[in-house]
Image (tube, rainbow, N blue to C red):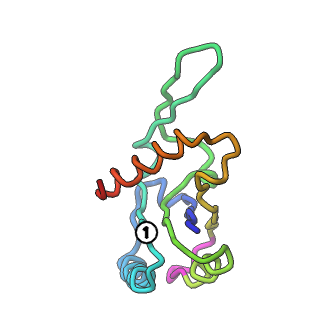
Amino acid sequence: MRFMVIVKANEDSEAGNGPSAELLTEMAKFNEELVKAGVMLAGEGLTPSSQGARIVFSSTEEPKVVDGPFAETKELVGGFWILQCRDRDECVEWIKRMPNPDGQAGVVEIRRVAEASDFEHLTPEVAELEGRLRAQSAGEA
């Protein structure tokens, strides 16, 4: 199973203040553990929402672009991992070990990545196309 681990933004990250040298070092060590365990598929930090945009869709209008920054810092994503774990409990155990040398309060959310088989209306044709596209994007085709 794949899980998206969502690290919520905070006032510092939204202000563009990068992590401390100590946190960067600890996170690099943690990421190394994840990679060596074969769990980490991807992981990145994100720039502040002031550098982003949202596309708002409506049933009656063309999509609308809204430039950042966005108001609700606690609702924003500051970074993420994609982890491959046998189940949610294993993912939780990994993330409980996530470094926090600065002792900051924060929230990390874990969500299972939906697989094609999770969608009841998936046709065999669309499933085949999705499989080909995944292989192609992974450089396998």
* Position of 100 relative to 130 (above/below): below
Q: Residue at x 42, y 61 (%)?
A: 45
- The single residue placed furthest to the front in the displayed view is 124
- Which secondary structure is most common in the magenta stretch? loop
- Range of residues picked out in magenta: 98-105
The residue lying toward the viewer, choosing from 134 and 12, is 134
Query: Residue 104: percent from the left, percent from the top?
Result: 58, 74
- The residue pinned by badge 1 equals 41
Q: Residue at x 59, y 58 (%)?
A: 113
**In this picture, residue 126 sits left or right of residue 114:** left
* Residue 107 drawn in magenta: no
Q: Quadrant of residue 61?
A: top right
The residue lying toward the viewer, choosing from 6 and 36, is 36
Query: Residue 50: percent from the left, percent from the top?
Result: 44, 43
**Around disc 1, counting alpha carbons within 10 Å, would you say few (fewer than 14), some (14 to 19), or many (20 or more)?**
some
Query: Residue 15: percent from the left, percent from the top?
Result: 45, 54
The residue lying toward the viewer, choosing from 108 and 100, is 108
Q: Residue at x 42, y 66 (%)?
A: 43
Q: Residue at x 37, y 54 (%)?
A: 135
* Residue 103 drawn in magenta: yes
Query: Residue 99: percent from the left, percent from the top?
Result: 51, 82
Query: Tag 1, which secondary structure?
Result: strand
* Position of 128 relative to 79 (above/below): above
The disc labelled 1 sits on which kind of residue? Answer: Leu
**In this picture, residue 98 sits left or right of residue 28:** right
* Position of 103 relative to 5 (above/below): below
